[in-house]
Image (spheres, rainbow, N blue to C red):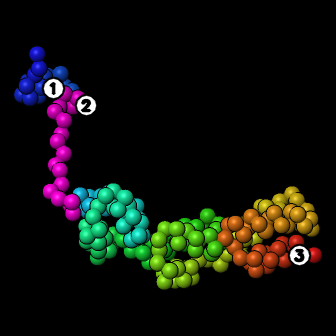
Amino acid sequence: MPLDEQQKYAVRSVMNDPAGELEPPKRRKKPENSLEQTKKWALEYLKRPHSEKELRDKLAQKGASAADIDTVTELCVNYGFVDDAEYAGMICRHYAAMGYGPGRVRTELQRRGVPKELWDQALEELPEGTDTIDRLLAQKLRGRDPSDRKEREKAAAALFRRGYSWDAIRAAMARYGAEED
């Protein structure tokens, strides 16, 4: 025999059901139109910082119309929820702190859809990488003979993959005392 709503609440209060398992399921209010749904998707997605391109791509992936995407993206930019310049600086600081060089940071900025005109300004914020590259080179050559050409090449290749230029790698090798033959 099914209980009606009033009986369920009476039973809950008598049984002291703190988990609320006997409460009726809450009904979600459906958005009035597609623009409202697109706004909800955008706000959900923007709990973490993203670029404008990433937001547009995500909304398109969810199935929003082009007009709704334009409207919502413009609103997000105007309200400051999306700021590509700030996002580019954040990406640069994050990857620099992880020990990556300018080449790797550029790749990340491109992958995340930050406009190219913002790259230079963001890359200027990168700290001088000599301490970082010296520390990484010392880690790579730790316990190995720095005069061994094969070991130097392996260490240089690892630094290049981390985004450092060949000039910076050569300078670090010279500071470390592992000059090339």
Marks 3,2: beta carbons within 8 A: no
Q: Which residues are magenta?
A: 20-36
Question: Would you name the residue on which mark 2 appears?
Answer: 19
Residue furthest to the top in view is 1
Tell me the number on the disc at residue 179: 3
Image height check: is 45 above or below 113?
Answer: above
Question: Would you name the residue on which mark 1 appears?
Answer: 12
> Earlier along the polypeptide chain: callout 2 or callout 1?
1
Q: Nearer the viewer, residue 157 or 80?
A: 157
Secondary structure beneath label 3: loop
Question: In the figure, is residue 90 to the left or right of 64?
Answer: right
Work out how far the residue at label 3 is from the one at label 2, CA to CA, in angstroms: 69 Å
The image quarter in which residue 60 lies: bottom left
> Earlier along the polypeptide chain: callout 1 or callout 3?
1
Disc 3 marks a residue whose amino acid type is Glu
- Residue 137 seen in the figure: no
